[in-house]
Amino acid sequence: MGFKEENYQNLSTTLIKKLKQRNFEGYFCKTRTDALELALSFIPEGASVCHGGSESIKEIGLLDAVKNGNYQYLDRSLAKTPQENREIMAKGILSHTFLMGTNALTMDGELVNVDGNSNRVALLCFGPEQVIVIAGMNKVVENIDAGIYRAQNTAAPVNAIRQNLKTPCYDTGHCGHCHAEQCMCSNTVITRHSGHPGRIKVILVGESIGY
Ligand code: SF4
């Protein structure tokens, strides 16, 4: 094991204890392959599964595995109208499993997420029986302020390019605290505790994943 990987493992031990205090379940996987296997082990066959916009769940192969596996995948790409899209998103409330990444995870175990459409943070807060969060160790930050800064200055500019959004962070690579029509920052959600023990499962991955 390299020095960096060993440090990730040590740091994850600290974080998992913090997560437990918050009624989250924390796990550490050395590789994305292990993380994929662990995430799938939490999802029973036939379960309804939906997800938020996340490069992390794509990068570890979780999205493809769910789409191609024996699950009821709530596929928003099948929506032909905005109303159908809304109806599929609404079904997410009653789904078994919600998959997501996180913009940041603090050293104290809080999840920090900034969302434009806000369906992602809505389902994190309420609805699905379980939420599986895939978090590369690159998402770990010192505190909530650093997490918000990360969301708006590391993740958002890249997301703006990916989605071709007309926002200041697209143009400058840095948050301009905008109110643009396509602004990605409507709601900032700090998840500090789960009222349902184990509902939120955070899988830490000993690699840099997502952005
Ligand atoms: S410029 Fe706008 S969309 Fe981009 S990070 Fe800042 S508030 Fe969010």
Image: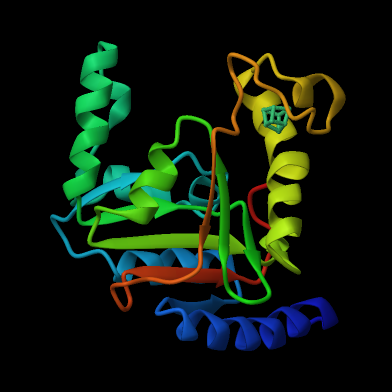
Image coords of residue 72 (percent x, y):
17, 45
* Left or right for 183, reference 82: right
Decide: is 107 above or below 115. Answer: below
Residue 108 position, x and y percent, is 63, 77
- Coloration mode: rainbow
Q: Residue at x 32, y 72 (%)?
A: 195
Q: Nearer the viewer, residue 9 or 18?
A: 18
Q: Can the viewer see residue 200 in this picture?
A: yes
Judging depth in this view, the residue of 30 and 104 nearest the camera is: 104
Quadrant of the rendered image holding ligand 1: top right
Residue at the outermost left position: 46
In front of the other: 20 or 6: 20
Quarter containing the N terminus: bottom right
Return the x and y of residue 173 as percentages of the image width and height: 83, 30
**Relative to 132, is 16 on the left or the right?**
right
Write the residue at 75% across / 78% down.
5
Q: Quadrant of residue 75?
A: top left
Considering only vertical position in the picture, is 171 above or below 146? Answer: above
Q: Quadrant of residue 104?
A: bottom right
Numbered label tally: 0
Q: Residue at x 69, y 50 (%)?
A: 148
Residue at 65 percent of width and 55 percent of height? 209
Picture coordinates of residue 29, whole percent (x, y): 55, 76
Q: Is residue 1 shown to the viewer in this render?
A: no
Is 28 on the left-hand or right-hand side of 12? Answer: left
